[in-house]
Amino acid sequence: MDPHLEEMLKMDEDARVAYLKAFTRLACADGTFDENEKQFIRNLARTYQISEKKVPEILASQSDEEILKEITKIDSRRVALQLIKELCILAHADDVLTDEETLFIGRVGQALGIELDKIEQISNWVIDKIILAEEAKIIFEEIEK
C-alpha cells in the first residue's frame, strides 16, 4: 500500500474530510469550481475511504477560517507535509499561481505548524518537478504536434 494512503487511513474521518476541504477551497480560489475538479475530489474521497454522505460537505464552499480551524485535526506531520505538497501541485496545475493561492497555502502550513521555509522548500520542489517533466517532453521528443 502507498505510504501516504496508509498514513491517511490511520487518521479519523474528520481529519480526512478536513484534508479534502482544503483541496476544495484551493480549487475554488480562481473563482470556478468545475465538474472535473469536483470529480477529482470525489475520487480522492473514495480513495481515502470517506463516506459518500460526507462528500457534499467536502464540496461545499467554506471560509478560510473554517477550513484552517478544521485542518488542525490533522495530527500527522507527514500528512501535513503531503497536504502542502498536493496543494502546491494543484495550485500550479493551471500554470497560474495567484497571490490568493499562495496565501492560502501559507496559512494552511502555519495552521499545521509547518515552518514557512519548509513550505517554500516544498513549493520550489514542486516547481522543479514540473520543469523537469517539461524538459523530459523536449528531450524525449514527446511534444504534441
Image (cartoon, rainbow, N blue to C red):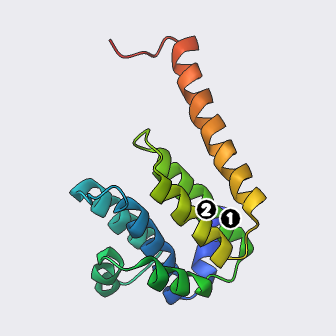
Q: Which of the 4 quarters of the picture holds residue 7?
A: bottom right
Q: Is 36 placed left or right of 1 in the picture?
A: left
Near-viewer residue (136 or 119): 119
Which numbered disc covers residue 35? none
Quadrant, the N terminus: bottom right
Amino acid at dot 1? Leu
Which numbered disc covers residue 81? 1
Which class describes the residues within 10 Å of circle 2: few (<14), some (14-19), or many (20+)? many
Amino acid at dot 2? Ile
The residue at the point 62 percent across, 81 percent down is 74
Residue 71 point in image, percent of width and height: 56, 81
The residue at the point 48 percent across, 57 percent down is 101
Element type at mark 1 = helix
Residue that numbered label 2 is attached to:
84
Residue 6 point in image, percent of width and height: 63, 71
Q: CA distance from mark 1 to mark 2?
A: 5 Å
